[in-house]
Image: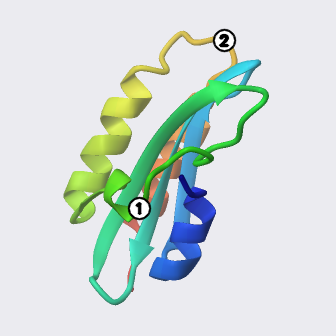
């Protein structure tokens, strides 16, 4: 196993945004852009307070990828699952996450 941050560095990913639910048991999605492929990549992870986002991935293949529209759909679907969750990203933070992707230019 490897850490997602190793993959981020090795693959030259630029972090655009992160949203999630942050409590003892947490869930987080991070979205990145890779200049060399001109694609967006994202990874959802969850765990308890003993672990951090991306601690237990197998490699770059664990990331989902697509164009800007696909990244926006993925964030939207993930955000839908956060509605009503006590320690989740706020409505404003979710809107900012979508704006970060929508407004990103390479």
Residue 91 position by quadrant: top right
The colour scheme used to paint the residues is: rainbow
* Residue closest to the eye, 48 or 33: 48
Residue 92, x across and y down, in percent: 59, 37
User: The C terminus is located in which quarter?
Assistant: bottom left
- Residue located beneath label 1 in the image: 101
Task: Note whether 68 is above or below 38 in the view shown.
Answer: above
| Residue at horizontal 76 percent and vertical 18 percent from the top | 24
Is any atom of residue 31 visible in this view? yes
Q: CA distance from mark 2 to mark 1?
A: 25 Å
Disc on res. 79: none
- Residue located beneath label 2 in the image: 86
Disc 2 secondary structure class: loop
Task: Note whether 36 is above or below 64 in the view shown.
Answer: below
Residue 94, x across and y down, in percent: 52, 39
Q: Are marks 2 and 1 in contact (CB under 8 Å)?
A: no
Mark with earlier residue (2, 1): 2
Would residue 42 be found to the left or right of residue 4 on screen? left
Task: Note whether 84 is above or below 27 in the view shown.
Answer: above
Task: Note whether 45 is above or below 5 in the view shown.
Answer: above
| Residue at horizontal 39 percent and vertical 63 percent from the top | 60
Would residue 65 be found to the left or right of residue 55 on screen? left
Residue 66, x across and y down, in percent: 22, 61
Is any atom of residue 104 visible in this view? no
* Residue closest to the eye, 83 or 29: 29
Disc 1 secondary structure class: helix
| Residue at horizontal 62 percent and vertical 47 percent from the top | 55
């Amino acid at each position: 196993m490897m850490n997602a941050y190793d993959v981020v560095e090795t693959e030259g990913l630029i972090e655009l945004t992160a949203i999630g639910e942050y409590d003892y048991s947490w869930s987080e999605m991070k979205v990145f852009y890779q200049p060399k492929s001109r694609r967006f990549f994202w990874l959802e992870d969850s765990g308890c307070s003993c672990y951090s986002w991306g601690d237990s991935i197998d490699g770059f293949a664990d990331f989902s990828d697509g164009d800007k529209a696909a990244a926006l759909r993925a964030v939207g679907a993930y955000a839908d699952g956060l509605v009503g969750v006590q320690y989740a990203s706020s409505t404003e933070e979710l809107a900012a996450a979508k704006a970060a992707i929508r407004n990103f230019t390479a």
